[in-house]
Image: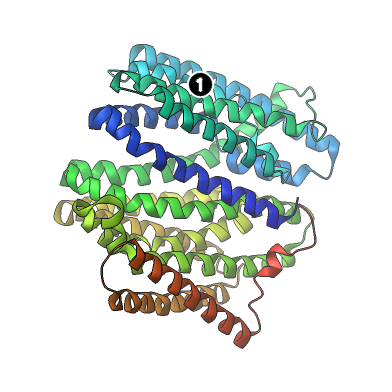
Amino acid sequence: MSTRKNAFYNIAYRVFSIFLPLVTAPYLSRVVGKAGVGLYSYAWSVSEIFVIIGMLGLADYGVRAIAKARDDRARLDRTFSGIFIMQLAVAFITLLVWLGYVAFAAGEEKTIALHLTWMSVSCMVNLDWCLQGLGEFRSIALRNTAVKLLAAGSVFLFVRSADDLWIYGLVWSLATLAGCLLCWPSLKGRVSFVRVPLKEAFRHFLPCSVLLISVLAVRVYRTMDKIMVGALAGMAENGLYENAEKIIYCLSGFISAIGTVLMPKVSHMQEKGETEAIRRHIDVSMQLMMCMTAAMAFGVMAVAPEFSVLFYGDAFAASGTLMRFLAITLVMIGFANVVRTQWILPQARDGIVIRCVTAGAAVNLAVNFLLIPRMGAMGAVIGTLAAELTVPAAQFVILRRELNYPRLIKHAAAYCSIGAVMALFVRLVMSMLSGHGWLTVAAGAVSGAAVFGLLCLAYWRVTRNGDLMGLIRHRKRV
């Protein structure tokens, strides 16, 4: 399947997966109340940690390994079989530990946690990493979307009171398992299971574990923000931060979706020794990423004050201010994502990922401790900004002699400048319109998109180096 179609399916699915819970959340809040939502959130968060451990770092390692082996069927089958054997063993052990937690450590969330067990079971049958490595994103997107739509409908149908909270957990837990199982038929004829010695299978364990460290580090500093704001500044401040961060998290799904699509392609190029082609690929990819993230970041900055009140209510007006600053992280995340998924990971230099992400986590915690007691949620925003800036900065220190960083930074500066002009124009348009309703926000967003598009076209024409479509029109199939 072409890169263009993969990008479409993966982005559409990621966005759908992120926004669907926002559809059921208002209903759940009214049915089970604050205590019920909090109880479920706690049980789900603990379950998610077990799922991350159960899957190790296969979201990156598995995709890369399959992409590199796909031209050699015998090597592909052995690679797949070895990784899958290791996955079964690790996921099974993790499942046993989870059941021990439910039986002996869980508190009032025990009933919900028990019905979330299918989340850990799904780790044993989740082969998304193999499909993605083969460039097959369509099956993942379409089949999981159908399952999640059915799950959302079941929530509205069966969750009627606070006593039904366990049903909510069971529905989403089973949906995850069903989505994994339904993707298995897509592998028929493309990969086969062969007998592989355990010693060979567990050679994949160490590199997977290395990548798991980086996944957990990101999870820690993104979760710790909310924990620290609640503990050091109070739950009201944490509510403001949660709602501001939620929108940015949704938009960052676009970034991770593009990185996920492009990594198998670059891993394949790396296996063939096309280093210079990869550098050119990174240059065009960075332009695409900076164009997209600058549009999102400065668009959010322009409409955040009005949007936060309309979407969350008057009580969350301050979330708009927090959102404005958090929006800048989209550009930082995008820049780091291109370097990570198209240079570092395809070369299996996973230690760089760990060092960069760990540095970001350390900076985040330090800034949070210093500023949250004084500035509340804004202190956490500054801590997040510092952390997300640390990651690409650490990449630069390590890789400055390997990549053309002046050119990459030039791309970022160019599109951020265009984004700043767009944001000023949007504010001007919105100030000229009466009222502060959705129509005003929509008018600002549409006019801003038009201005951003025209300025980009002008920039590409002047520089004669702006053919972003060259990336997705690449004739090679992946």
The residue depicted at 50 percent of the width and 19 percent of the height is: 95
Task: Locate residue 446: give its quadrant.
Answer: bottom left
The residue depicted at 65 percent of the width and 32 percent of the height is: 127
Q: Is residue 280 visible?
A: no
- Give the colour scheme shown: rainbow
Q: Position of residue 466 (x, y in %)?
A: 63, 77
Q: Dot 1 lies on which element?
A: helix
Which residue of the protein is positioned furthest toward the bottom in this rendering? Answer: 462
Q: From the viewer's perspective, is residue 467 above or below residue 155?
A: below
The answer to which of 254 and 317 lies nearer the viewer is 317
Q: Is residue 477 visible?
A: yes
Q: Tell me: 8 left or right of 293.
A: right
Q: Which residue is mark 1?
A: 118
Q: Amino acid at mark 1?
A: Trp
Q: Residues within 10 Å of mark 1 (few under 14, many from 20)?
A: many
Q: Position of residue 128 (x, y in %)?
A: 64, 36
The answer to which of 142 and 87 lies nearer the viewer is 142
Q: Position of residue 441 (x, y in %)?
A: 35, 65
The residue depicted at 33 percent of the width and 32 percent of the height is: 28
The residue depicted at 63 percent of the width and 70 percent of the height is: 283
Task: Locate residue 460: give its quadrant.
Answer: bottom right
Q: Position of residue 18 (x, y in %)?
A: 47, 44
Which residue of the protein is positioned furthest toward the top in this rendering? Answer: 103
Q: From the viewer's perspective, is residue 132 above or below residue 29?
A: below
